[in-house]
Amino acid sequence: MGTNNSKALHHPDMKKNPVIEVKNVTKSFKSVQAVKGVDFKIFKGQSVALLGPNGAGKTTLMEMIEGIQKPDKGEIFISGKKWKGNESTLHREIGLSLQETHFLERLTVFETLKLFASFYELGQQRVDEIIRIIGLQEKIRSYVVNLSGGQRQRLALGIALLNDPKILLLDEPTTGLDPNARREIWSILMDLKKHSQTSLVLTTHYMEEAEQLCERIIIIDKGRILKQGTLEQLLEEDNGDKIIEFALDESNRSIDGVSVQAGFQIQWDANRDKGVIVLNQIERQLPEFLNFLNQNNLRLRHLECRRKTLDDLFTTMTGRRLHE
Amino acid sequence: MNKLIQQKQLAQLISAHFKEIIRHPAVIFWGIIFPILMALGLGIAFTRQTDIIRHVAVIENNPAFTENANNELLIHAFLEKHADKIEPSGDKPHQYKITLVDEKLGNTTFLFEKTTWRHAMVLLKRGNLGIIMNEKKDRIEYHFDPLNTDAHFSYLKLSKIFGQNGVPVEENLESVHPLTIHGTRYIDFLVPGLMAMGIMMSCMWGMSYGMIDKRSKKLLRRMVATPMKKSYFLISLMTVRITMNLIESTLLFIFAWLVFHITIEGSIAGLFAIFIAGNIAFGGIAIFISCRTANTEIGNGLVNAVVMPMMVLSGVFFSYHNFPDWSIPFIQKLPLTLLADGLRSIFIEGAGYSEVFLPTAILLSIGIFFFSAGLRFFKWH
C-alpha cells in the first residue's frame, strides 16, 4: 500500500541521496503488527509530517528511524548508513525529542542543557544560543520540575537542537499543550526552517500542525501509509469537493449513512451532533439536500460550507476521524 | 584532547547526579539524620543501665489457694509477706511488686497480677508477660516458653526469690564484673552494622530504584540517543553514591564518637578499603537487579528480595550466631555479613588490613561481576 502511494515529489535535492530512507519496514509486538511494509524517502531540508490517529504506528516508525527499535523486516538508512555499527556517528547527526521525556527534576534548565551539551562536546556558548532560541532566558535557573508543560517541551526541543542536527525527529512535540504553547513550539520550528537546512520529521495527530510545519504529509493508519504528498496534492485529488456541515433542531442519528438520490451520502457525527455531506456538484446537490430535509420534516439549525481538510480526507478513507 | 572531553562528560554526569540527590531535602533526613537517630535510640536503649520490669501472672482460682490459704510456702502468702501491694487504678488490677536492688547489673522489678489461667494465657499471647506461676499442693510451678530467653531469665530470678522456705536467696554479686569497656558494648556492635546497612540500603534503593524510575520516564532512552558513553552514566551513579555513603557514614561515626565514645581500634586504610569494596559490591548488585525492568512496582519487589533476607540474616542488629549452625556458613558469605563483619573487626577487634583482605577481595569481585553482568544486559530503552 505504502509503495503504491509513494509518488515522486519534486524537490531540488531529489537527485541526491535521501537523508532518511525507509524500505519496506515491518514491526510487530506480540500479536500486534504495528508497522506493515512502509516505504518512504526524505531529502535534505524537507519537512515531513507523519500524520495519523493514536495507535496508527507513528511512534513505532519514528523509534525505528531513531534507532531505538529494530525493524522485523525491511531496512532503514540514515544519511546512507544503517544504525548497526554507526550509532556514534548517527547520534551526532540526529536531534530528537521523544514523546513525554522527563529530565532530571532537580536540575535547572541551564544545567540540563549543559549536561546534554557535554555529551556532544559543546561549550557554554551553544547552551546560551539554545536558551535564546527556545526563549527560556527567564527560566535558566528554574528546576525542570517547576516548568510548565510548554516550557518542558521547549526544553526538550532545545536539547534536540543542541548539536545543530542534520535531521530533527520530533515525536508528537505539541501533544497535550494548550494552543499558545503549541504556537510557541511552531514558531521555533518555523524559524529553524527559515534559517537552516535541517530535515524535519514529526509525528502528529493535529492536521493544523502538519499543515503549518511540513511541506510533505504522510498519512498513516493501522501501520500502513494511506496517502502521501504535499497538502495541495492530497486535497487536489478530490476535484474540489465541498464539505457541508449542518446541525438540526433535534439530534437525528437515524440519517447516518442515508444515501440521497443526487449522489451523496449523509454522515452523522454523534459526538459533535452534526451531519456532514461531501458534495462534488454543489449547485445541483445542495437543493436536493434541502429538499430531502424538507421531505423528512427535518429543520436546519445551522449549515456551513467549507473547504476539505486533512481530517475530512482521513474520514473519507477510514470512516474515522484523526482524533478518535 | 579526547580524554579531556570524556572527563568533562563524566564530570557533568557526576555533578548532575550529585545535585539531583542533595536537592531533595528528604535525602538529608533519611540519609543522615535517620541513621543517627537509630543509633541514638538503640544505643540508649541497650547501653544505659535502667530498671528491668517484668510482669508475672499468678493463677488464683486454684483450689490449692483455699486449701493452703495459711501455708507460708505458697505464692499468695509469700507475696502478702514480702511484696509491696499496689492498689488498683484505672484498668490496672491489684498487683504485688518485688524489686531486687542491684547496683552492678541494674534493678529488677517483678509485678505480680492474680488472674485466671484463661486470662493469663491471653496476656502471654499478647506479649504482656512471659511467665505464669501456679501452685500445686506444696510446689510452685513456672510456665513459660523454653525458647524465650527473657522468660528463662525471669524464671531463674523468681525461683531464687521464691527459694526454699520462702526465704529469698541472696545473689553473690562479688563474682559479677560488668563489661563496660569500649568495644564490648552493644553500641560498639551496632554502629558498624548500621554503617553496613546504610551502604546496602543507599545503593539498592538509591541506585536501583532511581535507574528504574529514569527508565520508566524515558530519561535513559533520551540520554543514550546522544553520544554519551554508557559506562560513564553508571560510573557516575556509583561515584555519587559512594561519596554520599562516605559522608553519611562519617557523620554517623562522628556522632557515635561524641555521644558513645566509639573508636576505631584497627587499620584506617583497611576500613577505607572494605568500605569502598562494600559500596562497589552493592552498587554492582543494584545495577544488575535494575538492568531490565521499567516498572517501579517490580523494582520495589526486586530490591526487597535482595535487601530483606540480608537485613534479617546478616546480623546488623543482633548476632547471626543465634541462627542454626548449618546456616552460619551460608550467612557468613552474604555481602552484607561480609561487610558488617569486616567493619566490626576493624572497629572493635582492632583488625589490620591483612585481616580484612579476603572479605574486601570477595566484595570487590561481587561488585565487578554484577556490574559487568548488569552493563551487559542493561536495557536503556
Image (spheres, rainbow, N blue to C red):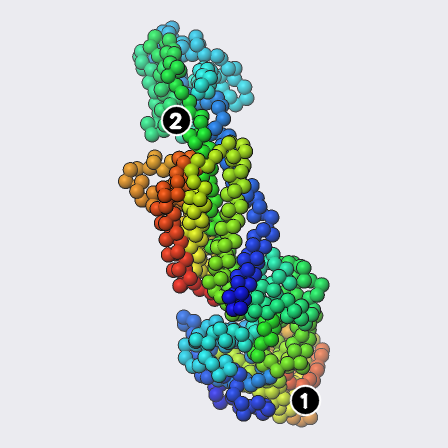
Disc 2 packing (10 Å; few <14; some 14–19; many ≥20): some
Q: Badge 2 is on which residue?
A: B150
**B348 horizontally vs A296: left or right:** left
The residue at the point 35 percent across, 12 percent down is: B163
Disc 1, SS: helix
Please tell me how many numbered marks the rendered image carries.
2
Say which chain tag 2 marks.
Answer: B
Please, what is the three-letter code of the amino acid marked with disc 1? Leu
**B24 horizontally vs B190: left or right:** right
Q: Position of residue A14 (x, y in %)?
A: 55, 90
Say which mark, if any, is on residue A286.
1
Please, what is the three-letter code of the amino acid marked with disc 2? Asp
Q: Are marks 1 and 2 on the same chain?
A: no
Disc 1 packing (10 Å; few <14; some 14–19; many ≥20): some
* Cα distance between the residues tagged 1 and 2: 97 Å
Of A276 and A13, which appears nearest the observer? A13
**A289 horizontally vs A16: left or right:** right
Q: Position of residue A118 (x, y in %)?
A: 57, 66
Say which chain tag 1 marks.
Answer: A
Say which mark, if any, is on residue B145.
none
As displayed, is residue B132 above or below residue A128? above
The residue at the point 69 percent across, 75 percent down is: A187
Q: Position of residue A224 (x, y in %)?
A: 49, 81
Q: Residue furthest left?
A: B326
Q: Position of residue A77 (x, y in %)?
A: 48, 81
Discs 1, 2 touching: Cβ within 8 Å: no
Residue B321 visible in the snapshot: yes
Of A201 and B188, which appears nearest the observer? B188
The residue at the point 44 percent across, 44 percent down is: B269
Residue A297 visible in the snapshot: no
